[in-house]
Image (cartoon, grey):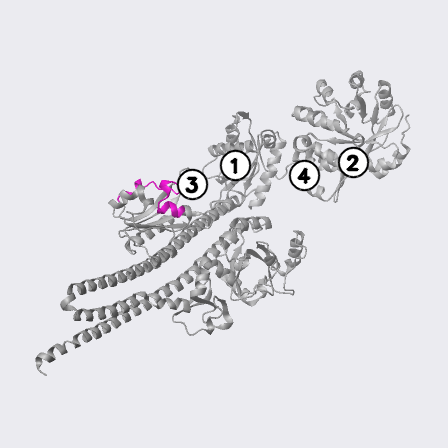
Amino acid sequence: MSDQHRSPRSLLFVPWIILVLGLALTYALQHNAREASRHELHDEFELRAAGIVDDIQRRMRTYEQVLEGASGLFAVSPQVEREQFITYVRALKPEGKYPGIQGVGFAQLIAPQDKARHVAAVRASGIADYDIRPAGERELYTAIVYLEPANWRNQRAIGYDMYAEPVRRAAMAAARDEERTRISGRVTLVQETKDQVQPGFLMYLPVYRPNAPHQTLDERRANHLGWVYAPFRMYDLMAGILGTEQGEVSKLLDLEIYDGDRVDAPALMYDSDHHAASVAAPLFRSTKTIPLFGQPWTIQVSSLPAFEARLASEAANILAIAGTCGSTLLALVVWLLASGRVRALTLAGNMTDELRASNLAQIRLNRALRLLSDCNTTLVHADDEYKLLAEVCRLCVDRGGYLMAWVGYAEHDDAKSVRPIAQSGYEDGYLDGVNISWADNERGRGPTGTAIRSGKTCVNQDVLTNPGLAPWREAAIQRGYRSSIALPLIGNTHLLGALTIYSRERDAFDKEEVSLLEELATDLAYGIVTLRTRADHAAAKEQVEFLANFDPLTQLPNRMLLRDRFEQAAQLAERDGTALAMLYLDLDHFQQINDSLGHEAGDKVLGVAVERLRHCVPAAATISRLGGDEFVILLPTLHDATDVGTLANAIHDMFAEPVTIDGNPLTVSFSIGVSLYPNDGQDFDTLLKRADTAVDCAKEAGRNTYRFFKRDMNPDLLAQMRITGALPGALKNREFLLHYQPQVDLHSGRIVGVEALVRWQHPVEGLIAPGRFIPLAERSGYIVQLGEWILREACRQANAWRARHEHAPIVAVNFSALQFSRGSVVDCVTGALAESGLPAEFLEVELTESLLLQDMEATMTTLHVLKGLGVKLSIDDFGTGYSSLAYLKQLAVDKLKIDQSFVRDMLSGADGESIVKAMIQLGHALDLEVIAEGVETSAQLGFLRAAGCDQAQGYLFGRPEPAAALDALLTRGVVPLP
């Protein structure tokens, strides 16, 4: 054949060459795309694995903060009561705010010699079956005494000695010796039952005695109180850490956690997919050992088939299909070149656009992944909320390639406005005029308002066509915002706000990119909540430290800080050869202010008193409030004792002017006691006690003055202090008893009543007369409790006599004025009558005349209620007080009692006779019975009968005796009259 015939045939190979070359190029491109997809999937795998590790570390640090807050309770006092501990843990709301934690507890360090006493004390507090487990003798015990919340599972752990178990003991000892948080190795918690047993571990934080040194190992061991700790069940913990992501992790990844620094089946603590071992070797696997509070954990993350299935790259498939089609079409173009060149070029251009769009989508996805990774890194290192928000916005612009990003918080005002907090990128005043709301109105139906209101992501793919963007469309177009996305920031309990991102392109947010940005918003919200929680814990810790050293009402140093400053001042005084003074100040009559004006007014008085004290106390001195109305001034570097007198006089002068509280002018003064270092004592407690003793001397001297401590101070004062201090114990130990003295009708000689008189059977001093302790009980306020006991006991005895004697006597009981001002007299009387079963007409209440001088309206109301019950009323010691005849008529009393001082003197002169006769006539004129007390002679009896007195009592008829001794006299019922 000629060349002219072969030449056209040779052209037939050109399309095939083009097709082969095209297919070869297509294979190379799709292979590179698949490799790139594999690397991207591997990067995502590593990112997810690193995120899990970061979540675990971050959550464990949060639990450490919980224990630090609990340890702060013990900084105030080494004895934290159960109710205090329960209140703290309940305030944490661990079930909601700290998912995965089983509880917060305290394990107390107990020496063998204290074991029995400890068990008895816990049982007495309400846990009747409490004991330390396991049984046996050990060098020391660390029983769990508190564990909250007190559910059935945690109750199983109370009393368990964790130090008896080697794995727990190793972590507890390390925490104590190193003074830092430690976690144990893999254990089975004592809370576990036979069902659903999970591996567990425990976190410990040591607690030391407040203000005791613990810088060295020996000091830490010597001053160690115990541990605050938290138990964890591993699967519950991981469910709390992974949260809503747990299901996704279980489907895509296999997470295994081992106790120790290597993968070892017996040390397995957690496995998210128990069936993963039967599956073929994973495509990706990451194994990392992390130190976690002194205990290594090995975390192994493996990919599952569902995750690996994402390796099928759409971009690679598109390239393969597009390349194959392109090569085929290009070959066809060659065939049709002469007739369809334009069509072929157009087709090639379309194919190029499709490839470019596919590559652009992949680039955007990779960019979003890098942005998520960078933001997570920022979250891990964040320590300030605003800086965190500003940095995330900057990363969205710089790393994410977006035009602008901002974070707005939802305000709970009437307009439900959205307040911009941080932004980055091209904004040009846009946020100043947007006026966005999250209410359901025109200003709240844009992407940001809708995302906050609904709690769901809102995507705007085109500003030009989205009707909800109408209020902001013009401003957005001017700045080049073509599309946007608003992502809600959801906290633990409420929605915080939204992260809004703008792009210069329309349709800029595809499904995969939206998913990654939602993950970024979730992480950001968690970071915000974590920073706020950390700030709350820091503030709470500062408050605990403040309360440990200062009085919350006056902001003055408390006893603990005063002691510390005394120790420092004493060292300086010893070094310089000087002295120091301790002034103990007691606010005179402060209880009357509280009783009359209320505790709020009392607090205001204390505040004004502190301000005045600060004006007259030297700057180097320390003013401390011990509590109530008691203050202490520590005066250091004292060269002359006269300086103390000068200061005491200055305080006296400073309070010469009345204090006005709520329009009421009040006279305020101090009784001051002074002790000097080193003459009166060389330690804090001795000086304080002796200054307190001197205060009592100042009160005895009439108050509003000062006294220095003297070693030969009034022995009676010291005895009074001893008796006053013993009153609470005497009430508790039932050391008081009643004697009864008969009251006789002077016409018939019949015993018509008895007066109940209290005596104190002291275990050391024997029987103490009422004259020694009744005034002290009045002064200290214990008369209220004592009076209630006297009333109940007298009613009980009266009802017993009523059951045995036909003519049972009426029992007269004395009431103190203090009982009327502080106690509920009506409730007390009705309660005693109901408890004993005594009819009201067999009870007589004796009132002192001084009672009529205080709050007459309230007193008369109370007495009328008692009279309405049927209780008899009498005025005791009549003539010694300030009785008003008008008041006597209003009170409708039944009897007047003539004081024994008038009876004793009535036969010594005409005046005495006249006074007693006048009292008897006055009583009869008011239709009252009259009884005279202190009748001891027949002559006194004869005069009283002649004067018309109705009744009498005294030694002539019988001394006060116990109830049993009086029974014989009551059986006779009559006393022979001379």
Residue tagged 1? 641
Measured along the vertical axis of the image, is residue 898 above or below residue 498? above
Q: Nearer the viewer, mark 4 or mark 2?
A: 2
- Measured from the top left, where is residue 808 in percent x and y? 85, 33
Does residue 605 show up?
A: yes
Residue tagged 3? 412
Does residue 574 show up?
A: no
Residue tagged 2? 795
- Measured from the top left, where is residue 799 in percent x and y? 82, 36
**Quadrant housing the C terminus:** top right
Identify which residue is drawn at 38% across, 68% down. 309
Q: Which of marks 4 and 1 is in front?
A: 4
Q: Which of marks 1 and 3 is in front?
A: 3
Q: What residue type is labelled 4?
A: Thr
Tell me which segment is drawn in magenta.
428-452
CA distance for labels 2 and 3: 63 Å
Measured along the vertical axis of the image, is residue 354 above or below residue 733? below
Decide: few, some or many residues near mark 4? Use Cα within 10 Å; few <14, some 14-19, many ≥20: some
- 831 relative position to 543: left or right: right
